[in-house]
Amino acid sequence: MYSEKVMDHFENPRNVGEIADADGVGLVGNPTCGDIMKIYLKIDNDVITDIKFKTFGCGAAIATSSMVTEMAKGKTLDEALRLSNQSVAEALDGLPPQKMHCSNLAADALHAAIDNYREKQK
Amino acid sequence: MYSEKVMDHFENPRNVGEIADADGVGLVGNPTCGDIMKIYLKIDNDVITDIKFKTFGCGAAIATSSMVTEMAKGKTLDEALRLSNQSVAEALDGLPPQKMHCSNLAADALHAAIDNYREKQK
Amino acid sequence: MRRVYMDHSATTPVRPEVVEVMLNCLTEKFGNPSSLHYFGRLGRRALDEAREKVANAIGAKPEEIVFTSGGTEADNMAIHGVAMLNQNRGNHIITSAVEHHAVLNTVKALGKQGFTVTILPVDKYGMVSVEDLANAITDKTILITIMHANNEVGTVQPIKEMAALAKAKGVLFHTDAVQSMGKIPVNVDELGVDLLTISGHKIYGPKGVGALYIRKGTRWRQSLFHGGAQERLRRAGTENVPGIVALGKACELAVQELDKEAVRLTGIRDKLIQEVMEKIADVRLTGHPTKRLPNHASFCFEFIEGESMLLSMDMKGIAASSGSACTSGSLEPSHVLLAMGIPHELAHGSIRLTLGRDNTMEDVDYFIENMVPIVERLRAMSPLNPD
Amino acid sequence: MRRVYMDHSATTPVRPEVVEVMLNCLTEKFGNPSSLHYFGRLGRRALDEAREKVANAIGAKPEEIVFTSGGTEADNMAIHGVAMLNQNRGNHIITSAVEHHAVLNTVKALGKQGFTVTILPVDKYGMVSVEDLANAITDKTILITIMHANNEVGTVQPIKEMAALAKAKGVLFHTDAVQSMGKIPVNVDELGVDLLTISGHKIYGPKGVGALYIRKGTRWRQSLFHGGAQERLRRAGTENVPGIVALGKACELAVQELDKEAVRLTGIRDKLIQEVMEKIADVRLTGHPTKRLPNHASFCFEFIEGESMLLSMDMKGIAASSGSACTSGSLEPSHVLLAMGIPHELAHGSIRLTLGRDNTMEDVDYFIENMVPIVERLRAMSPLNPD
Ligand SMILES: Cc1ncc(COP(=O)(O)O)c(C=O)c1O
Ligand SMILES: Cc1ncc(COP(=O)(O)O)c(C=O)c1O
Ligand code: FES
Ligand code: FES
């Protein structure tokens, strides 16, 4: 049911873990299924220099977490904010229809982490 | 679905035909299915000396016609009147439940032929 | 004993190619399609492929196919599902007097639940008139269900004309194509129908599986079963994967071979009809003389009764069927023959011969050879015979 | 890759002895049981024999068995048929919170049609309380439907006590024995039930066939399908003879082997449970510790989610299932686990391992060997993990 890319990111997720002295942290729960994702950011000069995630959720949740971290790394915050659920799903060669909501989790967690960083900057 | 005896009487029906100068003739139609049976009697001294039938109907109708003629032949009219649907069906080793009504046809035709004879005697 | 099976409208043997794919799903690909794992995915893939095959065979899209436990369930599902969802738009349903009981009894049951039912008559060939249908449609009509080809007399209805009429009036159209499938072209767009029923065991697939085509956007909802979320919530219950895969294969083969087989069977059938009419007196062809299924011959023999003919034929190894009261559980002669104006007594003497893949011209010879004396013998026994 | 199938509650492969009898009815004995001729009689005889086998297996009489397209249809048929015929006597139906959706959704649908529904709670083991049932019965109660054994957690309900209670109050009792059949004794008289459901594909028979037992004299009527007069007017549609014959054989074998197999599976299951509890921390057995099916082990693993466990296991060739929201079409976690008071997050981490004929003690070793690192890996990824 999942694409090969999804299975690859599920099996070998990139950027799993925590960042002890993170500049921004986002924690979101998926309202539809109850899954949870946490994203940690290191930010230097508005650029994401390091990113890690922890996820409690389905295969798609783990794979989209992994993919979103890969996509966000090296991007400016504004660029990262433009990463949508759709673009994450596409980068994984698509998700099954009933699993599209899982990609929300990843994009939302990233955005939450950026928001958290900006809040702290204020 | 039919017993061997039914199939034997269906395949080799006894006493098929007409009696040109019959002493009694009975014609009955089966109200449930529309089948028709005709029985011809030769009667001597209140005893059935010859009997023939013609039947338009199912396998059970033909077999019970055949059986009832065999059972009636040589009997007195009173004895013949005591032949019931049940006894004809039993003599054939039974009939399928949905075919029990067919045996009515045979007994009824016999009784009708006897009635016809007795009417004419009056 | 030589055995000649001429009852393909009752059911067909499952052909070897179909047995093979079915077997594979009983043992290797046995997974539940709802399961995530390897076995489940094999089952799911088999299911998807079968759905594509069935859809292709009738010119539909895969997502328009719902698998059922047979023609009967599909008919019930189609009619009940349209009725339930469209109650607010109208309560009038039109069908014909010659439908299979799966349609007729379902419509009649709705008639007892507040729906108004029109049962269209047929002519002496068993044909529904397009004009009658046009006159019957009212602004309360929500569904028309008329079969593609009749199971007892083989008459093919003018579905295309009738469906076009329905469409023009905004009425949904269902057709039972259980008998036509694999014998004449069945294409949902060419016919212009909204719902269409097929069944596995009439096309060399297994019993216990069928399919309902539901055109995308049709106002229909599942209303028979409750349970799991299978078939995209349109039919609850673990999918009969082996049966469905078999249905897929059977449909594929049926369509591939249709043209060739139709020509071949028409040849055999025409010889059969001709010989019966020539060699046996007082016999009548039932159904339409030309607008009939290529494999279908049906007759009424005067003065004698169907079951006794069937039994006699069976003793010679010939398998056929009859609409006689004596062969039906209900003791009513065929409602189809009666609707065609055939009198009770004559309907009693009906015989249906339906040909299939294994039948040959020699079977016709064998049939005639044996049938002539059978008819003679039974007529000699009949009180109705004028001779 | 080594493949270890531990999902026998989802479905089973069809065993060779069953395939064989089924095959025979696809090709040789393909006749329609309603046909008078030789082929029809073969089909009829096969059907009758299968009915006897199924009846024998559950201590019923052949005429009390109606064949269906599966467990789902049988559940629907039982509940709907009792409800429809007994409306005049009362409108109250009792069921439990842990039923299969085929029961639960059917009862709930009736709840929208004027029936009053009581859904009994369960304890932390998934067990219904006989006392709760006693308190729920009113003089309007017409039907109680409670499953024999639960599909998700394996808990076996006290059907005998509950059915006795129902009987004393003159209420009909239906039980869904789809999961218990072939695993623990299922006898309609010992259980004292009026209606009972079984399904083919859970007992090494095919998908798409099941049976409903209806005790003689039970106030029930067919209310789902309309059509032909099959199954003595209790289920319309050409009988799925191959499937039914297969179900008969599967039932026969299941009962023959029950005692031996139950002992063998209990041994494997107990080792499985013990090893999981020993080798993996923060895991909870779900369902009753002892009153459970002999082949059934189910757990909740803290901090991780079911689907990701299933996918990881599948990569190692292990097939299992989960009640996690992420594996269900609806995105709701299992209603069974929630009814047992298991919190959403924990229910998310459920895994069901259901053993069958091919499983061995070595499979347990293989499972543990692979499961330990899987759990470790996923926990290392989890934001919930306190370590
Ligand atoms: C025209 C027609 N419709 C429906 C059916 C019912 O199909 P099934 O036997 O698969 O339930 C049949 C055959 O029995 C049929 O001939
Ligand atoms: C307890 C229970 N009841 C009913 C069913 C439905 O049976 P079927 O899949 O044959 O429709 C199942 C399995 O799916 C089940 O586990
Ligand atoms: S006499 Fe007509 S059914 Fe037997
Ligand atoms: S995130 Fe829960 S289903 Fe995918």
Image (spheres, coloured by chain):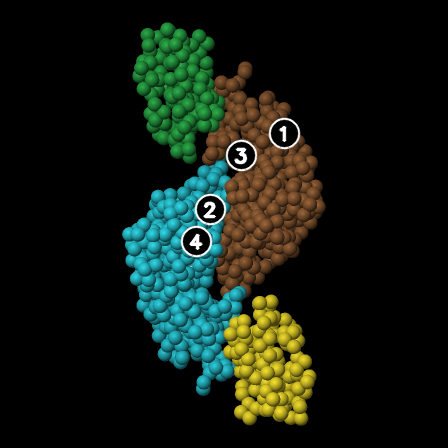
Chain colours: A green, B yellow, C cyan, D brown
Tell me the mark number nearer the camera, choosing from 2 and 4.
4
The mark found on residue D124 in the picture is 1
Mark 4–mark 1 CB contact (< 8 Å) = no
Q: How far apart are marks 4 and 3 (CA)?
A: 48 Å
Whether residue C230 is situated above or below residue C357 in the rendered picture? above
* Chain letter of the residue carrying label 3: D
The residue that appears at 62% across and 89% down in the rendered structure is B118
Which residue type does callout 3 highlight? Answer: Ala
Q: Mark 4 points at which residue?
A: C115
Secondary element under disc 4, as helix, strand or loop, is: loop
Whether labels 2 and 4 share one chain: yes
The mark found on residue D104 in the picture is none
Can I make out residue C10 in this image? yes
The mark found on residue C223 in the picture is 2
Q: How far apart are marks 2 and 4 (CA)?
A: 16 Å
The mark found on residue D320 in the picture is 3
The residue that appears at 64% across and 84% down in the rendered structure is B72
Whether labels 4 and 3 share one chain: no
Which residue type does callout 2 highlight? Answer: Ser
